Amino acid sequence: MDRDHSGLCGYNEVVLVGNGPSALDFDAGETIDKFKWVARFNSFKTSGYEKQVGEKSDIWVTCESTNVNNMLPYKRIYFATPEISPTNKECRGFRAINIYRPDHKRLFQIPYWAWWEMRANFFSRKPTIGAVISYYFSHIFSKVYIYGFDFLDPEKHHHYFGKKKGNGTNHHSPEQEANYFRTMIETERLFLLKDAMDIKGSVK
């Protein structure tokens, strides 16, 4: 099984900053910005929320190909889509980006084995890209911290910077999403950033 770490070997920790409304519950921005690798998702926003979510962005994880011109600030861009398979090596978004930016060396796809293992062990419906990248990175980094993940709670706003409630899509299962993250946290493959922060806002 190919577990190409795409040059990330040797780094101990990464923090995944989700777009859920709980991201505004703590002033975690300073702590987040201290990490060597900070990953954010799709159309995230930091402006106006720096105190809570920080502003450092090293890794952009997306299922969209529309933001071609917004890739320059990132060290790495990961495309998360279940379209890939052993016979279909590239998703549409990845192909579209490469048409416009064929020289871009920072583009990666989450490999098929990560999708396959998640579907086999946790999901009968499509996992979110936050879930998939957390699973993939749990095989690469010694510690993967998560922050701003609300597991598609239908009673909360979909994003901390938006007003829309619910999980935002019918493709995902809130129950399966919550079960996946609960299992990964209980087995110490993922760690909640809020539980690891001390009173000064540093990771213990």
Image: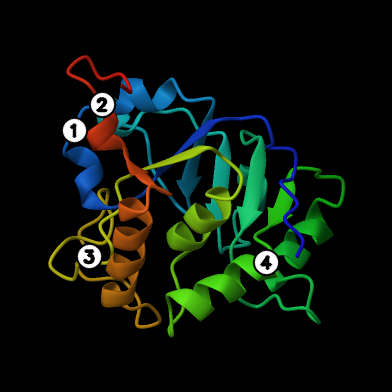
Quick check: can you spot residue 98? yes
Q: Give neighbour class at mark 4: few <14, some 14-19, many 20+ (Cα, 10 Å).
A: many
Q: Quadrant of the N terminus?
A: bottom right
Q: Position of residue 163 (x, y in %)?
A: 20, 59
> Spatial distance from mark 4 to mark 1, Cα to Cα?
34 Å
Residue located beneath label 2 in the image: 197
> Which of label 4 and label 1 is nearer to you?
1
> Spatial distance from mark 2 to mark 1, Cα to Cα?
10 Å
> Which of label 2 and label 3 is nearer to you?
2
Residue located beneath label 3 in the image: 164
Q: Are marks 2 and 1 in contact (CB under 8 Å)?
A: yes
Residue 182 sits in which quadrant? bottom left
Mark 1 secondary-structure assignment: loop
Q: Is residue 163 left or right of residue 168?
A: left
Tell me which amino acid carries mark 2. Answer: Met
- Name which residue lies at 50% across and 41% down: 39
Q: Position of residue 43 (x, y in %)?
A: 45, 52
Examine the rendered structure and indicate whether residue 85 appears above or below residue 44: below
Q: Position of residue 41 (x, y in %)?
A: 47, 51
User: Who comes first in sequence, dot 2 or dot 1?
Assistant: 1
> Spatial distance from mark 3 to mark 4, Cα to Cα?
25 Å
Which label is found at residue 26? 1
Tell me which amino acid carries mark 3. Answer: Lys
Examine the rendered structure and indicate whether residue 158 appears above or below residue 12: below
Which label is found at residue 93? 4
